[in-house]
Image (spheres, rainbow, N blue to C red):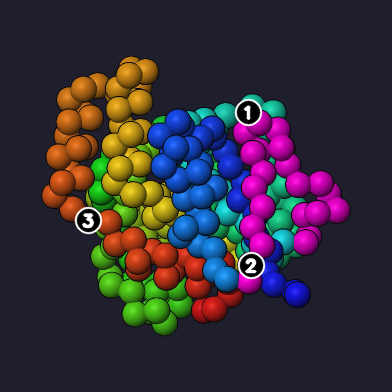
Amino acid sequence: MGGKRFAVLLCGEDSEYVKKKYGGYFGVFMKMLAEEGEAWDLYRVASGEFPDDDEIGSYDGYVISGSCSDSHGNDDWICKLIALLNKLDSMKTKVLGFCFGHQILARALGGKTGRAIKGWDIGVTAVHLSPSSSSKLYSSLKIPAVLNVIEIHRDEILELPSKAEVLAWSNQTGIEMFKYGGRILGIQGHPEYTKDILLSIIDRCVKHDYILDSLAEEAKAKLEEMEPDREAWKKMCTSFLKGRL
């Protein structure tokens, strides 16, 4: 039928909560991004599952998920993912990355990532869209100048690749969103997340001693004070990925 094809590159494992409520993170992405007539496939790249070389060019776009792994790490699957992203860049394929996906795109294109200068960012963050940007990403979509987004990360992009453009920033993170050409878009936040997903992750982080109880309680309080602008992010992400800008 000639419908568009997309693939999600899953860079972490599904939690029991997300599996039970959403059918895994693939289901979360489908709910946000998929439209009628499209075909979507899942590759669990963190488990070593990648598209074959002869399949790579059959997709109109790719989505890279978040991860518990460090974007500056050198695990085998991360190195293989970087090689794949370089291929997609050379093929001029649309790629949309969230959180770890945002960071690994920057690294693959020649930027640098590492531990965030200001530490963990957990909760709902106000992201300021850059007024100096030449991007049509939000001007043509009538997106507000400040958007709230769910975030949970302790790494960030420290240095952008050359020719990349910063599209948004926050008080916590200098590079909240960037684009590279018209085909690659990175977003530090999690527009795909709902509050309940984040709450389940916060509880898991406390259980495994990744964060202190005090930080968890502060993050939960922030969640009650602010609402993420999920529909605006959805409009922006789908318009970019589907080439409607």
Q: Is residue 47 magenta?
A: yes
User: What residue sits 42% from the left and 65% below the top?
Assistant: 234
Q: Please tell me the numbered disc located at residue 38.
A: 2
User: What residue sits 20% from the left and 37% below the top?
Assistant: 220
Q: Quote the CA–CA distance across marks 1 and 3.
A: 36 Å
Label 1: which secondary element: loop
User: What residue sits 71% from the left and 51% below the top?
Assistant: 86
The image shows residue 178 at horizontal and vertical percentages of 47, 59
Question: Of 167 and 40, which appears nearest the observer?
Answer: 40
Position of the N terminus by quadrant: bottom right
Residue 179, can we see it?
A: no
User: What residue sits 26% from the left and 50% below the top?
Assistant: 125
Q: Which residues are magenta?
A: 37-58
Question: For this view, does 129 lie left or right of residue 109?
Answer: left
Give the residue at mark 1.
74
The image shows residue 203 at horizontal and vertical percentages of 30, 27
Amino acid bearing label 3: Glu
The image shows residue 52 at horizontal and vertical percentages of 81, 46
Query: Are the residues at dot 1 and dot 3 in contact (C-beta closer than 8 Å)?
Result: no
Q: Residues within 10 Å of mark 3 (few under 14, many from 20)?
A: some
Label 2: which secondary element: loop
Q: Residues within 10 Å of mark 1 (few under 14, many from 20)?
A: few
Q: Please tell me the numbered disc located at residue 227.
A: 3
First along the sequence among labels 2 and 1: 2
